[in-house]
Image: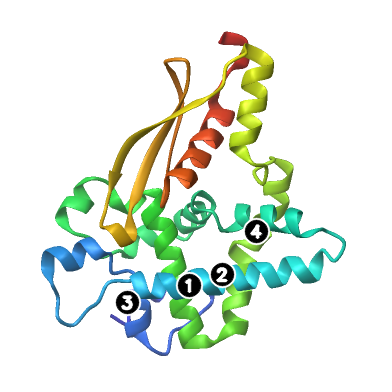
């Protein structure tokens, strides 16, 4: 196990004292369901912790660095920084999928590259760093890999309410109100995943996923904003 995470530790500049913690961060629930390993547990508890630490670190940063911004603006910026798609991008950059323990089915379905799995794994890793190294080291990690993307997020307008923006544009340009439809839902009640698609009339223009229908709709709207060619509609 010591060598399994050597490259990751080198890349992020953090050496774990407790190797079981970092190992736990990469155990997907599908692996446990299939193999039921007595010496391992899935990473959902670490994900729960990491999510809270991430939100605190981002909130603290925004509060201190932008004293003149109001609560609404700071909330939008925080949401953009901690949303699943952004975390998945960071998880991909860090090659977290390489280290995952997955079931054979999840492996075959491309689980190592799935956005929601990468996002959840990053939160699990943050939880592991927090338990092993404390808040200051964790905050430094979050700042380096997540908060540093804020400028790009603001430049590209990724902090804007995508659903409202898409509706404004669609009504202005083609006099159509977007319609959202459920594509699929999966997972147990405590960990649901939803896939939603957005349509202009009966033309599908975007698709997204999330832990709730609302989050999946927001993701679908962002997808549509990035892909729609208004001149061709």
211, above or below 233, in the image: below
Q: Which element carries disc 1, helix, strand or loop?
A: helix
The residue that label 1 is drawn on is 50
Q: Is residue 27 left or right of residue 155?
A: left
Which quarter of the picture shows residue 43? Answer: bottom left
* Closer mark to the observer between disc 2 and disc 3: 2
Q: Are marks 2 and 4 in contact (CB under 8 Å)?
A: no
Tell me if label 3 and label 4 are in contact, CB under 8 Å. no
Q: Residue at x 50, y 49 (%)?
A: 85
CA distance separating discs 2 and 3: 20 Å
Provide residue 195's location: percent of width, then percent of height: 37, 40
Provide residue 22's location: percent of width, then percent of height: 37, 78
**Mark 4, residue position:** 78
- Foreground pick, 182 / 25: 182
Say which of marks 3 and 4 sits in front: 4
Residue 31, picture quadrant: bottom left
Note whether 190 is above or below 193 in the view shown: below
Mark 4: secondary structure: helix
Residue 196 as seen in the image, left or right of residue 106? right
Judge whether 214 appears above or below 175 on screen: below
**Residue 161, visible in the rendered structure:** yes
User: In this figure, which colouring scheme has been used for the structure?
Assistant: rainbow
Q: Are marks 1 and 3 in contact (CB under 8 Å)?
A: no
Which mark sits nearer the N-terminus, 1 or 3? Answer: 3
Query: Which label is found at residue 54?
Result: 2
Location of the N terminus by quadrant is: bottom left
Q: Which residue is mark 3?
A: 23
Contact? badges 2 and 1 (CB < 8 Å): yes
């Amino acid at each position: 196990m010591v060598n399994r995470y050597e490259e990751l530790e080198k890349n992020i500049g953090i050496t774990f004292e407790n190797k079981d913690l970092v190992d736990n961060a990469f155990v997907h629930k599908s692996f446990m369901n299939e193999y039921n390993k007595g010496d391992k547990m899935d990473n959902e508890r670490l994900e729960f912790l990491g999510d809270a630490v991430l939100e605190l670190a981002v909130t603290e940063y925004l509060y201190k660095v932008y004293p003149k911004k109001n609560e609404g603006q700071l909330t939008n910026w925080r949401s953009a920084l901690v949303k699943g798609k952004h975390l998945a991008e960071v998880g991909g950059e860090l090659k977290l999928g390489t280290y995952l323990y997955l079931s054979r089915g999840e492996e075959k379905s491309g689980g190592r590259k799935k956005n929601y799995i990468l996002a959840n794994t990053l939160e699990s890793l943050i939880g592991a760093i927090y338990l092993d190294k404390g808040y200051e080291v964790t905050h430094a990690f979050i700042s380096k890999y997540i908060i540093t993307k804020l400028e790009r997020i603001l430049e590209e307008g990724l902090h804007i309410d995508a659903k409202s923006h898409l509706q404004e544009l669609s009504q202005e340009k083609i006099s159509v109100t977007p319609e959202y439809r459920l594509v699929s839902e999966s997972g147990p009640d405590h960990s649901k995943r939803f896939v939603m698609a957005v349509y202009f009339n009966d033309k599908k223009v975007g698709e997204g996923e999330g832990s709730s229908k609302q989050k999946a709709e927001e993701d679908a709207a962002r997808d549509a904003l990035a892909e729609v060619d208004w001149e061709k509609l």
